[in-house]
Amino acid sequence: MCTGDNPLTAVSVAQECSLIAPGTTVFVSHLKQPALCSSDGNMFVPLTSVEWKESTGQSIELDPVTLIPKSTDPHNACKTELNRPYCLAITGAAFAYLERHAQGTPAWKHMLMRAAVFARMSPEQKAALVDHLQQLGYISGFCGDGANDCAALKTADIGVSLSEAEASVAAPFTSRVSDISCVVQLVREGRCSIATSIACFKYLGIYSIIQFTTCCILYSYDVNLTNGQFLFVDLFAVLPITVCLDRFEPFSRLVPRRPTASLASKRVIASLIGHTVLTAGFQLAVFAMSASQSWYHAPEPATPGDPDSTPEKGDLNTILFVFSAFQYVFMGVVFAIGPPYRQRAIRNYAFVLVTVSLLAFELGVLLGPLPGLRSLFGLVKVQVGWRFVVFGMAVANFVMCYFGERVVFPLVAAPAAKMCRLARLVFTGRLSEIARRNSTKGLIDAVDTDTELSGARIKPSLWTYLGHRPGRKEYKILAHMHGLSI
């Protein structure tokens, strides 16, 4: 909470609104202001330091440097109270003093992360607070309803105006309700958008891999897909699925973890590589199995010595087109991931309609006696039993991709990334240097801190170092050091 009200009033409101959890001890900042006399007799009050006193008047305060609770009564240690969770309430005067004299210190960063209430804050201080939180790596949001909130609304990554007055001009979002319940909906929509963008990106990437594999096999025999086949794949299969993948609604509740926000993250890369191997591998397997059949006829030029005379219609073209057509639809189902960020795929009625219609149409082309459709797409009649084999291979490919997307690929993403980093260290010759340092300084810096176990300092292993992310947000490092939840 960031307000211009009295700090105790703000603490009371925050507790009633559950911004401060029940049972949490609140420490309010107080400036020590000793009255001194100057040489000309005029009184002045220098701001010398900040004290942190318990809000209900108990004999407990915080150490001004470490921000660790301590009792002010040596005869009553209040051990039970000291072990309870605690937070801070900071006044604008204390914030200005600490910003001027302690900015960048561990105590300043710890204070920003522990604080739950900022009271008596000026408009400039509100904007400065948002900026300092952003410097710690936070994605900062701010809700306001007045002109004094405009600066903070513009500075924040997500500014939400709770009125249609001056604040709505500065804020990217304006709520129709005058409370912060809209923030939950905003976060749900944002996470759904990120998850949808990642799903569409992966689907279009795998679509390209499927078509690339098909064309490469056909090119090896100097043939290609027909114009009708290209038109069906691009216009009537991939385009509707991509549009419907974008129409998922956000899930009904929030979860603690956020979705992957980077297209180059470990999970996205692992998913793309895994699906590439599976889809290309199944296409090659279907091609090899078909080529070994007695009824199969490989494409041959109509005019000997002239590759351009090879007819596109044939067993190879028919089998690969039908099999890849099933892959396009099934991969759309694989990437139609619902919870925890989007509603289940069954709730996306447009997606269900498109998927069922395409599967029914493709099954009709594969199994049904439809000479008109075969003529339209340039297909030939394949042995009936082999049609079921092709469909069975498509279903097997779908099952493996579905299981891999939801179970296998997320599990292997982190170990695979560590192995890649290990290979890079070996290739660049840095592995021996890291092993020689025996995880002293470089590895401690990498994992932020040592682990205390039975009084012994346990240094991080090489495997832990390989999992370190150089761009880790500073607030996550500080939360780990101070035992804060994030």
Image (cartoon, rainbow, N blue to C red):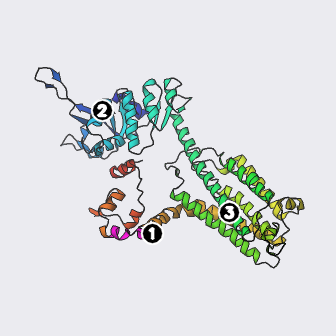
Q: Please state which amino acid type lies under the numbered disc 2.
A: Ala
Horizontal side, residue 322 vs residue 280: left or right: right
Q: Are marks 1 and 3 in contact (CB under 8 Å)?
A: no
Q: Which labelled disc corresponds to residue 378?
A: none
Residue 56 image offset from top left, x and y in percent: 30, 33
- Helix, strand or loop status at disc 3: helix
Residue 422 image offset from top left, x and y in percent: 43, 67
Residue 426 among those drawn in magenta: yes
Task: Tell me which secondary structure the magenta stretch mostly adopts.
Answer: helix
The first of marks 1 and 2 along the sequence is 2
The first of marks 2 and 3 along the sequence is 2
Q: Which residue is mark 2?
A: 96
User: In percent of the image, x 68 and y 69: which residue is there?
Assistant: 282
Observer-side mark, 1 or 3, equals 3
Residue count near mark 3 (Cα–Cα under 10 Å), binned few <14, some 14–19, many ≥20: few
Q: Which residues are magenta?
A: 425-435
In whole angstroms, how far apart are the C-alphas of marks 1 and 3?
Answer: 29 Å
